[in-house]
Image: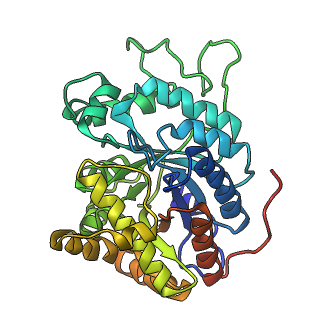
């Protein structure tokens, strides 16, 4: 596969493909059911406007994030879309047995042939106690330290090519490319491409060494973005998967009809992160609640720092910020994640950004 095939077609005047990262945000006064309905609407909107791919992120034990089961959500989105690439951004590999992931994403590939991505991370996507409950272990490091071995095992299951003598040689991830003398022969002509996700240098280096596409979490580790991308490009070795480096970055972006409303939403986003980082996760707060909240001086510093990493403002301001970020990082793709307490505000943000870049306006496809 070439980098051009991964890249797809650039639409409108965007310098690189634009994509969507969805955390299925549940805002104050809302429910997970309503958030998941927004995800369907947003995925169909993204498809109609020419966004390249739509990924869902795995998180656990967070009331304001209803994306604990990416494979389940992606199956639902596959039933409501026709063309847009769907994937995980990501599945946290240490939380799951590699065979289970291979089966889940083989099933998704059978449902939506040729448009499923498997993005993998090594973080827990939650706190330590919840990670222990997921992994049935006493610590976080057991899964993370074994990540390269787990990754190799998962890829073997996806390709169905364990060598003779391996204890898993006769185990097959179904649906999948079953080889050899198995009844029915090959089950699928494709298997989901594997991406590595990261917020530091570990996965950047590993993705480069393996010749895999890389997705960096700029939206919560902005200071590490350029060093990680440099490391990925320096470590890259061409592979059967990819002929040259391909890196996307996740970007927190919010466009509103006026600058003040964008600032209000960003302040609410910062309050949500403060609560999460101090062990008080809840539903995503609305801007009125954030305006009434008495931030300590330390929290105000956090608001300024966190808000500075969110590309926000009017549509033109967001486009300018995204263009500048692309120039500074040289990213091959920008994956936008928008946080707001209401689904209509998230949809409006993506609509404004799509309009700013002149993306197609073909209207929503039928379900």
Q: Nearer the viewer, residue 25 or 242?
A: 25
Q: Residue at 71% of width from left, 17% of height from top?
A: 184
Q: How many marks on residues?
A: 0
183 displayed left or right of 120: right
Q: Residue furthest front?
A: 292
Q: Is residue 189 visible?
A: no
Question: Is the image coloured rainbow, by chain, by secondary structure, or in one colour?
Answer: rainbow
Residue sticking out furthest to the right: 366
- Residue 16 percent coordinates (x, y): 53, 73
Q: Residue at x 45, y 72 (%)?
A: 265
Position of 115 with respect to 137 (left or right) is: right
Quadrant housing residue 312: bottom left
Residue at 50%, 45% in the rendered image: 66
Measured from the top left, where is residue 70 in percent x and y? 52, 40
User: Can you say whether 260 is above or below 129 in the image?
Assistant: below
Residue 82 can be seen, yes or no: yes
């Amino acid at each position: 596969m070439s980098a051009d095939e991964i890249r797809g077609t650039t639409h409108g005047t965007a310098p690189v493909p634009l994509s969507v990262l969805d955390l299925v945000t549940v805002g104050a006064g809302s429910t997970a059911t309503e958030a998941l309905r927004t995800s369907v609407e947003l995925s169909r909107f993204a498809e109609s406007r020419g966004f390249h791919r739509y990924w869902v992120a795995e998180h656990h034990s967070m009331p304001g994030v209803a994306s604990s089961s990416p494979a389940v959500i992606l199956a639902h989105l596959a039933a409501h879309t026709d063309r847009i690439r769907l994937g995980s951004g990501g599945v946290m590999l240490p939380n799951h047995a590699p065979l289970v992931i291979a089966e889940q994403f083989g099933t998704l590939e059978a449902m939506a042939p040729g448009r499923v991505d498997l993005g993998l991370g090594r973080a827990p996507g939650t706190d330590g106690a919840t990670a222990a409950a997921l992994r049935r272990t006493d610590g976080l490091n057991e899964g993370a330290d074994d990540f390269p071995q787990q990754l190799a095992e998962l890829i073997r299951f996806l390709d169905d090519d364990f060598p003779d003598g391996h204890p898993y040689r006769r185990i097959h991830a179904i649906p999948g490319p079953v080889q050899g003398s198995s009844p029915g022969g090959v089950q699928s002509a494709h298997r989901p491409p594997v991406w590595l996700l990261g917020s530091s240098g570990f996965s950047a280096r590993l993705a480069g060494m393996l010749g895999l596409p890389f997705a960096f979490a700029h939206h919560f580790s902005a200071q590490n973005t350029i060093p990680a991308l440099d490391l990925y490009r320096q470590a890259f070795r061409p592979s059967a998967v990819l002929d040259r480096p391909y890196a996307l970055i996740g970007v927190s972006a919010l466009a509103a009809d006026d600058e003040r409303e964008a600032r209000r939403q960003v302040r609410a986003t910062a309050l949500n992160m403060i609560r999460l980082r101090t062990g008080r996760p809840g539903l995503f707060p609305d801007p009125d609640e954030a305006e009434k909240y008495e931030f300590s001086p330390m929290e105000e510093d956090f608001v300024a720092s966190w808000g500075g990493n969110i590309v926000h403002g009017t549509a033109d301001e967001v486009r300018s910020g995204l263009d500048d970020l692309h120039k500074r990082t040289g990213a091959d793709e920008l994956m936008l994640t928008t946080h707001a307490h209401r689904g209509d505000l998230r949809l409006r943000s993506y609509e404004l950004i799509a309009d700013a870049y002149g993306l197609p306006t073909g209207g929503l496809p039928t379900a």
